[in-house]
Structures are given as C-alpha cells and as structure tokens.
C-alpha cells in the first residue's frame, strides 16, 4: 500500500509525475494544508530507494533509514518561519558531497518563500547547476514571494484545491462523520481542517458565521451583533478574515446558482445579489487594509459601521 493512499489528491499528483525523468530542481506549489511536504518526502523516498524507480519498496536499507529519519543522503530544512543563510549554506555543503548508500541525494526545502533575500541569492547557483545525482525539491504556498529566477528554474508540480464534495468525502473518511463544509472557512485546505477539528479550533468560524446568520435573519440587533463579534476571542484582523470568508462562501453559491443548504438555508429568503455581496466583501477588504495600516484602530466603531451598511443592504 502506498504511503499516499490516504491522500488521494497527492497520490494522483505523484502518479502524474515521471520520477525517472524528474528534473533536478522542482517546486511543489499549493495552498497551505494541501500536503506539499508529504508529497515532497514521498518523491524523495522514491528517488533514494535502492530497489525501485517508480515508488518506494519500503524494504531496502534506504527506505528503512528514510522512515527512521536517519538517511545520510537526505536533507530537509527545519520548519521555521524564516530560512536563514546559514541553513542554505548547510544545504549547499550537503549537495556537493558524494552519496553514501543511495543512487542519488535529495534535498527538500519546505516553505521556501520563507527564505530572505540573501538565502534566495545563495541558492540560485545550486538550482542552476546542480550535481548530476542531486535533486532539490522546494515547496511553497506563496510563490509570488519567491525570486522569479528561482521560480523559472524549477519544474512545477501543482496541487489544486479540493472542491466541496472532495473535501467533505475526505474529511469524513478520516472518521469525522459530523463534518459540515460550511462550518469551516473555505480558505482552509484538507489537512488544515483536520488539524482544526482535532485541536477544537473550528469554533471561531462557527461563532462568527452563527452571529452573522442571526443578524441576517433579524434575530439580533446591530448593537447585539457588534457586541457578539467583539466578545469573540480573536484579533481584529482574524475576525475580519473570517467575515470575508463568510461572505465569499455566500457569493460562490450565488454565482453558481446553488441554493444555500444546512444552517445557511434561511439565507435563501434574503435578497442579497452577487453585486451586493461583492460590495460587502469590498467593504471588509478596506477594513482589513485599514487594520493592517493602523494597529490602534477602533474595533467597536469599525464593526458597527460595517454591520450598519450590511443592514442597509439587507433591508433595501
């Protein structure tokens, strides 16, 4: 059984990748929580395997050492917020050594967008002129933060986001039978959602969406809504991001002409057009930009102003 059987979208991507003809520099790109590092390590394990060139045999010395995280021909960076020049130098020094037990050497650099400018400049030459038996696999969820020369030098392996049905089926297959797609922000990828469920952190979005649903259904007043949102234990920016996602979820359903379901069903009677919803999202984006520029922004005043405008749209 493949190590990727539990992640069908990763397994599909792996099967579509010709490992025997893999270029020496590759970039796996996709949203946070899509499993980019899992795929990168599986590709690395395959490249290092002594018995197979299509997938790991899981029996040879190389596969055993890889599973024990002691493989001498494998380098992976620490999962830190910043990748500093010293770590890149360590990687470069590793890349010029001869392999010990495997036919190749493999480097995995996770979250490579976290490299500072000095680190990105340092890695360029290695990407452009890698050793013949060395493979470098980068992962990134923010490719626009990457030096464009680095991006252009790499073979691209893209992981697309799962749609609602795929995501729901996968999360429920992990034993979360009560999973409801609408209870979580749409920007969360499958592994992030599973982590949120396991750590009990899905409640924040549920609180925000429940509050807005009550307001849209005329169950609570403007002042009660603002107080409800203020009492949620999140920073202003996090709250606004969740508000934006709530309305993006509604907009997606409107544009696809799909009736709201589950706890959102009552919103079918509220005549917010796609243009109205786009205006709401624009207002929230402006609020988010203001929060990012002014740290001491009055949260109470800002939320009240937004809820008042939303109320005007609903009742017009």
Image (cartoon, grey):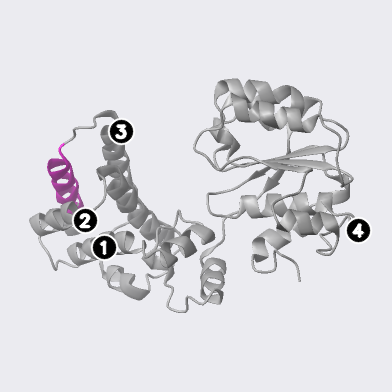
Tell which circle, 4 or 2, labels the residue nearer the N-terminal end. Answer: 4
Q: Secondary structure at mark 2?
A: loop
In this rendering, position of residue 260 left or right of residue 307: right
Q: Quadrant of the N terminus?
A: bottom right
Alpha-carbon neighbours of circle 1 within 10 Å: few (<14), some, or many (≥20)? some
Tell which tag, 4 or 3, sits nearer the viewer.
4
Asked whether the residues under the numbered discs 1 and 2 touch, taking CB atoms below 8 Å apart as contact, a structural biologist would say yes
The residue where tag 1 is placed is: 207
Alpha-carbon neighbours of circle 4 within 10 Å: few (<14), some, or many (≥20)? some
Measure the alpha-carbon separation of dots 4 and 2. 55 Å
Tell which circle, 4 or 3, labels the residue nearer the N-terminal end. Answer: 4
Q: Secondary structure at mark 4?
A: loop
Membership of 300 in magenta stretch? yes
The percent coordinates of residue 199 (x first, y second) are 40, 63
Measure the alpha-carbon separation of dots 4 and 3. 53 Å
Asked whether the residues under the numbered discs 4 and 3 touch, taking CB atoms below 8 Å apart as contact, a structural biologist would say no
The percent coordinates of residue 2 (x first, y second) are 75, 67
Residue plotted at (72% across, 50% down): 70
Question: Can you tell which mark lies on residue 232?
Answer: 2
Give the answer, above or below, for where 241 lies relative to 218.
above
In this rendering, position of residue 239 left or right of residue 21: left
The residue where tag 3 is placed is: 292
Question: Can you tell which mark lies on residue 51?
Answer: 4
Tell which circle, 2 or 3, labels the residue nearer the N-terminal end. Answer: 2
Q: Which residues are magenta?
A: 298-312
Q: Secondary structure at mark 3?
A: helix
């Amino acid at each position: 059984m493949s190590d990727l059987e539990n992640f069908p979208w990763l397994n599909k991507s792996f099967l579509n990748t010709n490992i025997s003809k893999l270029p020496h520099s590759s970039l796996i790109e996709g949203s946070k929580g899509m499993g980019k590092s899992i795929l990168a390590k599986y590709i690395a394990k395959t490249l290092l395997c002594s018995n197979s060139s299509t997938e790991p045999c899981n029996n040879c010395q190389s596969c055993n050492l890889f599973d024990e995280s002691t493989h001498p021909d494998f380098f992976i960076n620490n999962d830190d917020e910043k990748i500093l020049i010293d770590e890149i130098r360590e990687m470069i020094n590793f890349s010029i050594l001869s392999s010990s037990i495997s036919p190749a050497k493999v480097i995995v650099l996770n979250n490579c967008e976290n490299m500072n400018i000095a680190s990105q400049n340092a890695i360029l030459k290695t990407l452009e002129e890698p050793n013949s038996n060395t493979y470098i696999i980068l992962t990134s969820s923010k490719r626009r933060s990457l030096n464009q020369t680095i991006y252009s030098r790499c073979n691209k392996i893209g992981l697309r986001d799962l749609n609602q049905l795929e995501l729901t089926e996968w999360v429920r297959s992990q034993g979360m039978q009560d999973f409801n797609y609408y209870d979580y922000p749409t920007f969360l990828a499958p592994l992030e959602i599973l982590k949120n469920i396991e750590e009990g952190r899905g409640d924040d979005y549920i609180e925000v969406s429940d509050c807005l649903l009550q307001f849209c259904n005329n169950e609570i007043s403007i002042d009660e809504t603002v107080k409800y949102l203020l009492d949620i234990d999140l920073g202003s920016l996090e709250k606004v991001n969740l508000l934006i996602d709530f309305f993006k979820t509604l907009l997606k359903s409107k544009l696809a002409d799909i009736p709201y379901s589950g706890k959102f069903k009552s919103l079918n009677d509220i005549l917010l057009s796609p243009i109205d919803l786009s205006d709401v999202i624009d207002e929230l984006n402006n609020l988010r930009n203001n929060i990012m520029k002014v740290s001491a922004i009055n949260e109470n005043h800002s939320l009240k102003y937004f809820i008042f405008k939303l109320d005007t749209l609903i009742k017009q």
